[in-house]
Image (cartoon, rainbow, N blue to C red):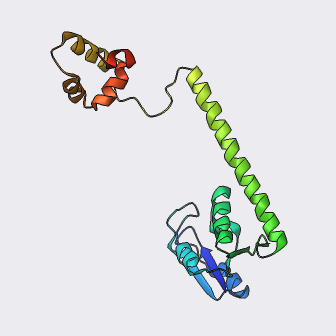
Amino acid sequence: MKIGYARVSTEEQNLDSQLQALEAAGCERICEDHGVSGAAIDRPGLADALAAAQAGDVLVVWKLDRLGRSLPHLVETINELRKAGIGFRSLQEQIDTTSAGGRFYLHILMALAEFERELISERTKAGMAAAKRRGKHIGRPRKLTAQQIDHARELIKSGDQTRADIAALLRVDVTTLRRALGDSEANE
């Protein structure tokens, strides 16, 4: 069975041309999403199409960007279809994973998606390293300022309050206070 999926990003757009193309391609069932971005995780129409598809079926879209916005997401979705024995066809790009040429094209897409992920990772790591060299803190914001840590040290030295009392005063967990004070003071 051929299952069509049509999507428009805004309520003002209509699905007429997509629906006509999917019907002409022989889709027996067509699921739709109106006013839903391709980047959205929750797409009821796509969820219905995927739930209806069984091994041997083919999911058909008018254009590749109707299925998803990012290459990694597209590849992941198409790969999941393949694992379930479901074919994929994009009418405009003439991709058909039920053919050898379509599967070859899918492998190229997968290689490009992996390359894109690696480039993003490399850029992220390089940016973090550059920020560290400039003295920037990387990661979650610190819960305690330098002044709060100094104040906590003074209170500990005075011996009037426990670490639990000081942590409560600073509105942090005792573990957070111990980490902020550093290993040398953690066991005092």
Q: Residue at x 72, y 87 (%)?
A: 24
Q: Is 62 or 128 nearer to us in this picture?
A: 128
Q: Is residue 145 visible?
A: no
Give the vertical position of 163 relative to 115 (above or below): above
How many numbered marks are there?
0
**Furthest residue toward left:** 160
Can you give x and y, in whole percent of width and height, for residue 118 in the image? 69, 44
Q: Residue at x 58, y 71 (%)?
A: 8
Q: Is residue 181 visible?
A: yes
Give the vertical position of 74 relative to 21 (above or below): above
The quarter of the image holding the N terminus is bottom right
The quarter of the image holding the C terminus is top left
Q: Quadrant of residue 72?
A: bottom right
Give the vertical position of 86 relative to 133 (above or below): below
Q: Quadrant of residue 178?
A: top left
Name the side, left or right, on which 58 lies relative to 108.
Answer: left
**Furthest residue toward right:** 101
Give the vertical position of 57 relative to 116 (above or below): below
Can you give x and y, in whole percent of width and height, for residue 127 in the image? 62, 31
Q: Is 126 or 85 nearer to us in this picture?
A: 85
Q: Quadrant of residue 159?
A: top left
Can you give x and y, in whole percent of width and height, for residue 116 in the image? 70, 48
Name the side, left or right, on which 139 lies relative to 100.
Answer: left
Can you give x and y, in whole percent of width and height, for residue 165 in the image? 18, 25
Name the side, left or right, on which 99 lies relative to 30.
Answer: right
